[in-house]
Image (spheres, rainbow, N blue to C red):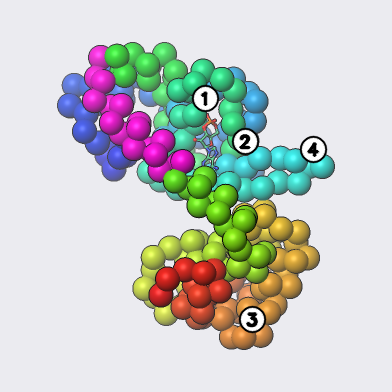
Amino acid sequence: LTGVEMFAGLEPEARQRLIAAAVPRTYRRGQLLFVENDPGESLIVLKRGSVAVFRTAPTGERAVLSVMRPPDVFGEVSLLDGSARSASAEALEDCSALALSRGAFMELVHTHPRILDAVMRSLGGLIRRLTDQNADYVFLDLPGRVAKTLVRLAGESQAPMITIELNQSQLAEMAGGSRQSVNQAIGSFASRGWLRTEGRRIVVTDLASLRRRAGMAD
Ligand code: CMP
């Protein structure tokens, strides 16, 4: 649990209790961890691999809300309000994780209320992300959202060339557009020399231009 922000301030004894209560889980690539509207039974601490959190439209179309990577913690929303899962989660690669049951988590909250500081910070972060996503849907056109998704995936890397392992339908799910319109945006970025595609990979060659197209500060 080292490196997990939510549990960083816990005293060693509380951390031991947490480790004892956590159940190790493994998921194969493509496996669903849980599905939207399932009862929310546990908090997931991701140790290895990556997980897409997504919603599904009645047409079956997916919108990826976030990609979780270690040491991300998720599944806290239903745990805190006692209702159903707000989204589904699928392993993008083989994963290992720790699952903490609602009961164990609530007991920890009661015996170590300081953990609530970190829970509130994490919820604040989620609300901030949702606000950003909302603003992007209002203020950015689709190519702008594609550019922003690429910048986000590239992270804060200072490397002149960034390779993103992602196919275009995954990118479409993240940017909130059809595959066809995302392909068009990628094609137009490629023709301007901002990136090139190599099969499943997108190699970003001009991050600064993508940032500008996404309306982000230099
Ligand atoms: P929960 O509702 O238990 O299950 C789905 C989880 O996905 C949710 O808790 C959050 O941890 C996470 N989640 C839901 N919506 C978003 C979002 N828009 N961005 C990032 N994470 C989310």
Residue plotted at (66% across, 65% down): 141
Q: Distance from label 1 to label 2 (Cα)?
A: 12 Å
Indicate which disc residue 190 carries.
3
Q: Which quadrant: the N terminus?
A: top left
- Which mark is first along the chain, 2 or 1? 1
Residue where numbered disc 1 is placed: 78
Residue 38 coordinates in the image, percent (x, y) = 63, 23
The image shows a total of numbered marks equal to: 4
Q: Distance from label 2 to label 3 (Cα)?
A: 32 Å
- In the image, what residue type sits under mark 1? Ser
- Residue 80 appears in the rendering: yes
- Which mark is first along the chain, 3 or 4? 4
Residue, far right: 59
Left or right? Give the position of 33 relative to 168.
left
Query: For this rendering, which residue is in front, 217 or 70?
Result: 217
Q: Is residue 213 above or below residue 17?
A: below
- In the image, what residue type sits under mark 3? Ala
Residue plotted at (50% across, 34% down): 26
Q: Which quadrant: the C terminus?
A: bottom left
What are the residue bounds of the magenta stretch? Answer: 111-127
Query: For this rendering, which residue is in front, 28 or 190?
Result: 190
Residue 51 coordinates in the image, percent (x, y) = 54, 44
Rendering quarter of residue 187: bottom right
Indicate which disc residue 58 carries.
4
Indicate which disc residue 88 carries.
2
Residue 174 coordinates in the image, percent (x, y) = 62, 54
How many C-alpha atoms fall within 10 Å of the one at disc 2: few (<14), some, or many (≥20)?
A: many
Q: Distance from label 1 to label 4 (Cα)?
A: 22 Å
